[in-house]
Amino acid sequence: MDVTAIIESLNDAQRQAVSAPARSMLILAGAGSGKTRVLVHRIAWLIKIEHISPHNILAVTFTNKAAKEMRGRVEDLLQISARSMWIGTFHGLAHRLLRQHSKEAKLPDTFQVIDSDDQLRLIKRLMKVLNIDDKKWPPKQVVWFINAQKDEGLRAKDIHEESDDIYQQTMLQIYRGYEELCARSGLVDFAELLLKAYETLADNADLLAFYRSRFKHVHVDEFQDTNTIQYAWLRLLTEGQDNLFVVGDDDQSIYGWRGAKIENMFNFQKHYPNHLMIRLEQNYRSTGNILKASNALIACNEGRMGKELRTDDSDGDLISLYSAFNEQDEAYFVVERIRKWVAEGRLRSDVAILYRSNAQSRQFEERLMATGTPYRVYGGLRFFDRMEIKNALAYLFLMAHKGNDAAFERIINTPTRGVGAKTLDDIRRLAKEKQITLWQAMIELMKAGHFTPRAENALKGFVQLINGLAEQAKDLELYEQVKNAIEKSGLIEFHKKEKGDKGEARVENLEELVNAARQFDYEEENEENQSELDLFLAHAALESGDAQADDFEDCVQLMTLHSAKGLEFPLVFMVGLEEGLFPSQQSVDDIARLEEERRLCYVGMTRAMKLLYISYAESRRLYGKENHPRPSRFLKEIPAEQLQEIRLRASVSKLVRPKKAAKRAAIGTSGRYRLGQRVRHEKFGEGVVLQVDGEGSQERVQVNFAAAGMKWLMLSYAKLEVL
């Protein structure tokens, strides 16, 4: 292979990066600029042109998928095996190092790597031994604390204990006990892999010298996502070598909440003063208008390294901006555009709906299902399949039907209430012997005085809770029943104790379940005469699981903006661009977090290849509350010349009669209603018509009722009175 074969397909900046003389380099690679291509061709250049042995090359990335892709592309380009190269994730390479040098690492040869579930179970067991209340100090919070310290390179002994900080004292007590337990048992968690690998090299001069000598060229992908210990490990390995080749983009640093340090991008320039910086600004993904808008948005962040994406492609279509009346109108609009896209002969898999919060997915899932459009939630579960939603539904099932054994099993000790394994086994045994429900078995054993006082009290509290919820439900609307069950069960507090974004997302989803109940649409004609709660539970069960498309099926992709990083789609919908939602409420008063939110918006916009739709709602009921948010500040940062409003905003209010309602065109096939028209329903009271859907006997109307919120009603049964 000659020089031409390696660099002929590259642009000027890529060629410069690939063929530069050996030295530390920072490749500032914009979205869609071919960073993986540069890494692969750089390795090929070193091997074929500079005659570096594959044995002397190390390449680090963040996911196994990316590592596998890099290895495959190197082998395809060079037509040689890449086995002698170390190509892998930080965790994978650290594990490899520790396996080969377990003695130097002071680990048994048989040490075991434990996953996050194993780590949590270990912490729970330790806390019982230490007699620490797991209700006051949630084990997941402890796991988060320990992993966060390890990511910063800190052992328990390295942390100064504050005498007046009971939280820190408790966490450190558990951390010390956990370190001892893992050392005795030969267990290594994910965070420990990185810290132990760093310590092993730092504490063994000969071993460090060997690896410094071996890895003459160290390459790092997604450098902006490195945390403290990862960067420290890289610096240790390359100190005095001037051989660290990193590829990253400060404008795509969106993982600060999980420990990534954007500061590493800037510190690199200080720690490697002889480095060469090359900017990759030629974009091969998006149209000119999308790039111009993205450049203008990200330019509002301060302290950037600075670059501007450009393309040789045409400007393409303008970015479409849609102002929805509410979140349901937003979902209706998006899905109708997708249906039009598919009707024109294009693929569903070329379409992505991107949202800031997982809770937003429900509206789109329901609308996609209603239209028979296959979809897949990328990197996550469908709304009704999420753990916290299943927990809440189990409370609702059990309060309505005591014989639901699956619901009983799910929530008898969620949140933890002190019901042990033996107590549960006794209940199961009696239920099996007598062929009765678990609830009945529990009651019989309680009456017989079978349980210990502690177990008896725990079960008595559970019975009172479920019976109380059932009694209170008689006088409550459906959404109030759901809200009451979630609050009284303690699920909100239970998940609030989970640190980081996961706990916050679970709470948001529980609050969104209340919204789902408020907006639940059921036909007036109910032949089985089921309660509204039973109908809602049946609806949730039917929406769970089966409707999601198979892996091989052509389907629409739904995902959070964080999950979208690294992906690209011809058609992208970025939804919910409203103050308090995106940017999130937690970020609006924090400059650093706000800038990360702006980077997240930039990442979302640059996922679009041909068409980009951005939407926001004038009214949104989210997390169980109705809001009238302002459009996101990010919209004002996009130049007007790159935007087109595809429908003028209409002034529809649920409380005020529109002044020109009479002039609005009739909507729906029947022509009976107009947008913004005020109507009255016998049960729900007064409201405003927002949209009509379906045809003939299936025609239905969406009304925003002042008291009952959003409802979809079948026109055949609704009996709406026009005001």
Image: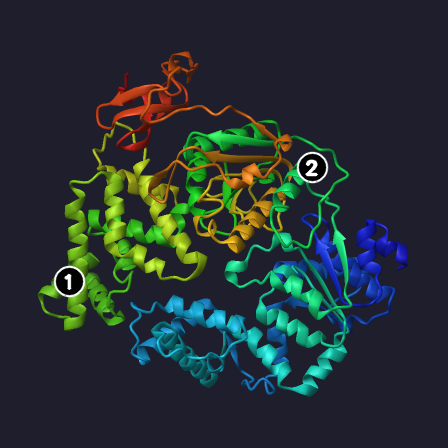
Relative image position of residue 179 (x, y in whole percent): 45, 81
Residue 287, numbered circle? 2
Give the structural element (helix, strand or loop) at label 2.
Answer: loop
Is 671 rendered above or below residue 414? above
Query: Looking at the image, what colour scheme do you see?
Result: rainbow
Left or right: where 229 falls relative to 244: left
Left or right: where 131 falls relative to 27: left
Give the structural element (helix, strand or loop) at label 1.
Answer: helix
Q: Residues within 10 Å of mark 1 (few under 14, many from 20)?
A: some
Which of pointers 2 and 1 indicates the residue nearer the eye?
2
Is 689 rendered above or below residue 57? above
Residue lying farthest to the top in this orientation: 663
Nearer the observer, 502 or 301: 301
Residue 449 visible, this angle = yes
Instruction: Report which residue position mark 1 lands on.
Output: 460
Quarter of the picture containing the C terminus is top left
Q: CA distance from mark 2 to mark 1?
A: 64 Å
Quadrant of the image occupied by residue 433:
bottom left
Relative image position of residue 715 (x, y in whole percent): 32, 21
Query: What is the three-letter code of the residue carrying label 2?
Result: Thr
Nearer the observer, 125 or 665: 665
Query: What is the three-letter code of the residue carrying label 1?
Result: Lys
Q: For the point 18% across and 63% down, which residue is it?
A: 459
Quadrant of the image occupied by residue 232:
bottom right
